[in-house]
Amino acid sequence: MNFDSDYRMLIGGELVTGSATLDVVNPANEEVIASVPDATREDLDKAIDAARKAYPGWAATPIAERKAKLAALGQAIMANADPLMRLLTKEQGKPHAESQGEVMGAGYWLMAASQLDLPVTVNEDSDERYSETRHVPLGVVGAIAPWNFPMILAMFKVGPALLAGNTMVLKPSPFTPLSTLKFGELAAQLLPPGVLNIVTGGDDLGPWMTSHPGFDKISFTGSTATGKRVMQSAAPTLKRVTLELGGNDAAIVMPDVDVEKVAEELFWAAFRNNGQICIATKRMYVHKDIYDQLRDALVAYARTVKVGDGSEQGTQIGPINNKQQYARVLELIQDAKDKGYTFLVGGEKADVPGYFVPVTILDNPPEDARIVQEEQFGPVLPLLKFDDVDDVVARANATDYGLGGSVWGNDEDKAFEIAQRIASGTVWVNETQHLSPMAAFGGMKQSGVGVEGGVEGLLEYTNAQTIVRKKRKEAVAA
């Protein structure tokens, strides 16, 4: 298996090239590193037909066998972690260490998800009747994965969908399709033909999928703006949808923290993966009593962090993944400059090839600033001062988003109480970004519809079916 060339789609168990291609760019140097198939409508139809054909057999496969297949697929990812990691860095930009963590996490996620079970609820078992509610697969799932974590976020969908007995057509982002296509080669060796299909394409492919009558569900991870279009496109056929969308996560840092101990962790809460994480800290509210001390500690640490090509030793932060997002981040920085906000570090465009933006931290901009109200999805962080808990909770919740958040404090009980007041799907105390395949993850408000992870995420790929059996009187008497 060659990880450096020969990128093909997986349709009906066969690896296919397609009739047209798309270029994939390394964001660290803007050079074309590969070409991948650009799927046509006919290619998509073939993938859906293959999934539909495979569905009855896969749904009828005992769940223990489906679990074993998923666990084997997770093990295959881990066995190929090194070449997948290097490929992921080339297409996504993140440093090797982070790519390694993502690839291993993807394998682990499949293996852990394979341990979940579909619950059966007995509603009544009386002399008169027996009633139970079980969960049956939906059919064919269309999965659309993003470019920031292309491997592991795809597994968020593959694991529960296939475990529940569905078949799938998976579309990676056109910016990061390479590692997913190589994952498809592994899947072709382990799964029955048509159970998992992978197609790649440009801007047209996603809308073709969301509107296609051949899908019973769409699972999408991406921006809130695109999520709204996905929901609208799915509505005419009443497809089920799971939408994991954007966030504007707030961190609240209480005055009793040990600044020396938490400064580095708080930095990476905002800047891990170059800030390109839906649950990255995007607004940091710091109590006035420690504001200056933490501000200075964050700036001092930021000056030690190496930004560069993720494949080079010592790199801690790579480039922005794509040109569109790069332009978006620079626009927000320019807006902050135009408004006269104070930059503590960064704020200047890097004069090198690649989509590099230096680590940028702003000093207490106004609450209505774009850099505060909008999701940056890049290496830019506003620090904001507060002195009242009720006020900071209100400010943290004053957003259309509600994906994640965090509270930091030495008094864990008090921090936990504050966390319960944050209107977000997940809130961490004294850490952030910890996700588990055993726990539900989803957003409130405009951060999404439905959840991923845990039994709750598994049930998103099923219909509840209640079976009621009236007992014969003679059987009861016997």
Image (cartoon, rainbow, N blue to C red):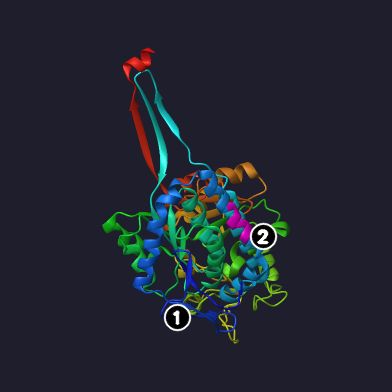
> Residue 322 in the image: x percent, y percent?
51, 77
Q: Is 61 drawn above or below residue 11 in the view shown?
A: above
Circle 1: element type: strand
Q: Quadrant of the C terminus?
A: top left
Q: Nearer the viewer, residue 430 or 50?
A: 50
Q: Is residue 61 magenta?
A: no
Q: Is 397 placed left or right of 342 in the picture?
A: left
Residue behind mark 2: 265
Amino acid type, residue under disc 2 in the picture: Glu
Q: Nearer the viewer, residue 69 or 104?
A: 69
Mark 2 closeness class: few <14, some 14–19, many ≥20 residues within 10 Å: some
| Closer to viewer: mark 1 or mark 2 | 1
Which disc number belongs to residue 374?
A: none
Instruction: Residue 301: name its quadrant.
Output: bottom right
Kindly tell me whether residue 442 is visible in this rendering. Answer: no
Residue most toward the left? 236
Kindly tell me whether residue 477 is visible in this rendering. Answer: yes
Residue behind mark 1: 21
**Residue drawn 39% across the image and 20% down it:** 126
Which range of residues does the magenta coloring cover?
A: 71-76
Q: Quadrant of the N terminus?
A: bottom right
